[in-house]
Image (cartoon, rainbow, N blue to C red):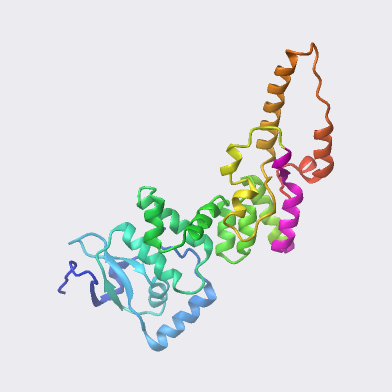
């Protein structure tokens, strides 16, 4: 078989299916619907592979190829009993191959924002954390890139549920504001009780603490994923106003600020007491958090 890996667009061939491999964790698409897979197997048995898959050499001179684009067709072809499969062979580095795979999947239906987010992270790492280069390679807007990166604050269980179509993007965006343990417990209730995005937004708004009333320095809060103001800048679904969903952090910062205030007042007064009005108000407004710590807003 003649090869010319120096050609920019590669070459077409009909390769033995046993010479083609799937690289674990490479494909931007993480979820393959079983019903859709069976339908594709039936179509391939009937019509064969209409569009070649894209592959790249595993290593020059050693034989074998990695799948770049078309893993669904490759899997279905194996199950359909094909011995050979049409391919387009291209010589690609890891980052270039990843970008091509993401673009190819983005142009097809059903790739989820969770899969996009995880892929964007891989491209960013391949660019040495150069965000502008990653955006250029992906061909995304700044806002889309920022929203997908912020979505990575969602727990893996939340991202998996979004990928498997068990929840909507709005659910995942709202859940990503919560601390990890709250995300997991709240996710289970969303799935089991069928809470809508609107339901979750309302409950999270009641659960979160108003940063405008905080007595501590809020500089760090400006870039904190638990701050709804950060989410409002990139997410379609968010709670209004600057609210903090991390009660532990809010409490620690409040206590530290009060202690500093207390030390300052000692210089003027011999004895200083702080009443518990604010704490009583929090307990009154947030019984779910006070009584069921770690379970989240629902």
| 51 shown above or below 173 | below
- List x then y, in percent, for residue 131: 41, 51
Q: Is residue 117 left or right of residue 274?
A: left
Query: Residue at the spot x=38%, y=72% of the render?
Result: 70
Queried whether the magenta region covers residue 78, the answer comes back as no
Residue in front for this viewpoint, 289 or 236: 236
Q: Residue 2 falls in which quadrant of the image?
A: bottom left
Report the number of numbered marks.
0
Instruction: Write the start and end of the magenta stretch as one range.
Output: 193-213
Query: Residue at the spot x=75%, y=54% of the render?
Result: 203
| 176 shown above or below 197 | above
Queried whether the magenta region covers residue 200, the answer comes back as yes
Query: Residue at the spot x=41%, y=85% of the render?
Result: 45
Query: Residue at the spot x=57%, y=51% of the render?
Result: 155
| 110 shown above or below 118 | below
- Is residue 24 something one can see in this rendering? no
- Is residue 42 something one can see in this rendering? yes
- List x then y, in percent, for residue 146: 50, 55
Residue in front for this viewpoint, 79 or 149: 149
- List x then y, in percent, for residue 19: 28, 69
């Amino acid at each position: 078989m003649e090869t010319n890996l120096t050609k920019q667009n590669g070459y077409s061939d009909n390769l033995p299916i046993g010479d083609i491999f799937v690289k674990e964790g490479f494909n931007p698409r993480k979820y393959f619907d079983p019903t859709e897979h069976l339908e594709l197997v039936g179509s391939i048995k009937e019509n064969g592979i209409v569009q070649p898959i894209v592959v790249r050499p595993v290593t020059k001179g050693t034989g074998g190829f990695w799948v770049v684009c078309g893993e669904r067709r490759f899997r279905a072809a194996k199950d359909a009993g094909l011995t050979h499969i049409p391919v387009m062979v291209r010589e690609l580095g890891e980052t270039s191959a990843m970008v091509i795979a993401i673009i190819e999947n983005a142009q097809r239906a059903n790739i989820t924002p969770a899969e996009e987010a995880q892929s964007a992270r891989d491209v960013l790492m391949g660019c040495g954390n150069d965000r502008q280069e990653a955006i250029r390679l992906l061909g995304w807007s700044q806002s889309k890139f920022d929203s997908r990166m912020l979505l990575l604050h969602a727990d893996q269980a939340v991202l998996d549920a979004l990928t498997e179509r068990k929840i909507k993007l709005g659910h995942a965006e709202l859940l990503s504001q919560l601390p990890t343990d709250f995300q997991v417990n709240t996710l289970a209730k969303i799935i089991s009780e069928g809470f809508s995005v609107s339901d979750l937004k309302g409950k999270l708004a009641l659960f979160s603490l108003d940063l405008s009333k905080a007595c501590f320095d809020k500089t760090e809060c400006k870039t904190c994923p638990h701050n709804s103001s950060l989410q409002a800048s990139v997410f379609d679904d968010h709670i209004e106003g600057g609210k903090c969903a991390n009660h532990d952090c809010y409490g620690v910062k409040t206590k530290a600020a009060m202690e500093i205030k207390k030390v300052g007042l000692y210089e003027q007064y011999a004895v200083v007491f702080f009443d518990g009005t604010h704490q009583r108000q929090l307990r009154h407004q947030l019984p779910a958090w006070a009584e069921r710590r770690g379970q989240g807003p629902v």
